[in-house]
Image (cartoon, helix red, strand yellow):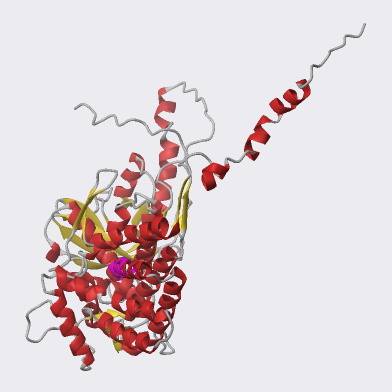
Amino acid sequence: GHRRRSFAPGDEERALGSRGKGEMGAMNLDQSAGLGGMLKDGTTLAEGVDEAVLRNIAATQQLAGIVRTSMGPNGMKKLVINHLGKTLVSSDCATIVKELEVVHPAAKMVSMAAAAQSTEVGDGTNLVVSFAGELLKLADELLRTGLHTSEIVSGFEAANARCREVLASLTARSVASVRDVEEVSGVLVPVLSAKQEGAEATLARLVAEACVAVMPPPRADGADAPSFKTDQVRVAKIKGGDVSQSTVMKGLVLARDAETTLKVAENAKVAVFASGIEMAQTETKGTVLIRTAEELMNYNKTEERALEQIVKDIAAAGCGVVVCNGSISEMALHFLNKYDLLAIKTPSKWETRRVCAATNATPLVRLGAPSPEELGFVARASVVELGGRKVTLFEQTDDVASKIATVVVRASTASLLDDLERAVDDGVATVRALCRDPRLVHGAGAFEAQMAAQLAAYGAQATGIEQYAIKKFADAFEVVPRALAENSGLDAAAVLADLKAKHAAGDLAAGVALADDDDPRPVYDALAVKESALRLAVDAALTVLRVDQIIMSKPSGGPKPPNQGPPDA
């Protein structure tokens, strides 16, 4: 009863071949395709000096060329329209490279270095990109003369080590006290003039006052090392007016109106609720059977009495201002008005936290009377109209500690307001860097000219093939005075020659004179800004130089949808 199957010769091999086709296919290597035959379909490969190194250098040079014309107070602005259609007009390097959405991997490393500089110290982002681009441009020249990449890298590393050694010796002076508004604003003027020419004096004073206001009071033991977080200084953008009408306020500005009829409260205690002011909904549905008209009339009375008792307890605790992070029911609003409380809603939990920081209050998750320790204090809470928009001010007097200060900037257009906000943020980050390191160096290209002279002398003493890379590293510093001169319409060659002659004669403060004043005001830059910028620029440039192969996989995902065009009106 058994059936027999007979196999023809080769049947067994064919059966094995069909079963193991997937496993054996991965083992087949097309040797004629080279390295590409080993990788997935769609993978691109670039290797060698011509394909990888020089192409990376060219990409970073293009990025540096875009932002170099924005350096200095006479730098040009860039008009960038991002993928969302938003228009940005700015000369801030960090903003430009961020909105350009660079996709080339080498150029992206330089743009990430600029973003890190903006986060750490605020100023000097253009120096990072320009100096890295100039280093790679000079490395390109060395590669074409026959030097190997490793020799260039070792020369640049030796020059960078020498840079760090002489950095401290170039200190011009130090900020005596970061609590002195006049002194701090004098340091901020060059920082902000590169971003907002003409408004730098106004903005510098506002930023200095705001930063000094949020610094903790001096310690009792006399050791004064103030520090603060950059998000303690807020920016409120009010469209209308001009920059000269901008102000600074110790406290917080909420860009919304109060909910109650009461619009002003002075020397008031503040209760902050992380929830809304309304009766909680039950978790389960219930059915109520009402038999008489009297039951219908009394149905909501208990809820009204409970809510009125809550608001009454809040008022009895001495509270004058109520802030909540949720909705306020109509019934609650009625009782808040009845007990003369100023109530305001915050749009987000972040704003709620800032209100707590400005008033030293504790956010409550329960609806009820706060304890005295949970209450905050505000010298004056008021609703005012700025530029046709109602805003609520939480102001504190000078003798009350506040962790928040707000710079209210005024301008005619939204793009200018955004640019002013970025300038203020950069100024605040610079003040924070001054708190860590108050040393200053000569600005306007004087620091770079002196550093170039020092490294050129060091390169002349060096032996070995690295001396060529060290001399090129010194030449890269000339990009700053050259860019400042070109952006101001001056003869760059004549300015550089004059600058070298003055520094050779011992005038370490000589920089690029952009104004025709007989007695120009000295320009200083923070040493921490220069140190951070050089470190990040050199790291990015050396990383790009060390890359000799670029292997890019095919992007994941399916085909992109076709462009449908604008919708019909």
Q: Please tell me which residue is depicted at 19% across the width and 27% down the height of the picture.
A: 569
Q: Is residue 390 above or below residue 206?
A: above
Can residue 156 be seen?
yes
Q: Residue 20, located in which quarter of the rendered image?
A: top right
Asked whether 407 or 344 is in front, the reply is 407
**Magenta segment includes 134:** yes
Asked whether 501 or 190 is in front, the reply is 501
- Outermost residue toward the right in this view: 1
Q: Position of residue 473 (x, y in %)?
A: 34, 77
**Magenta segment includes 87:** no
Residue 501 left/right relative to 23: left
- Outermost residue toward the top in this view: 1
Q: Residue 83, located in which quarter of the rendered image?
A: top left
Residue 237 left/right relative to 302: left
Q: Please tell me which residue is depicted at 48% across the width and 44% down the height of the picture.
A: 43
Which residues, given as a range, are shown in magenta? 123-136
Q: Position of residue 8 (x, y in %)?
A: 79, 16
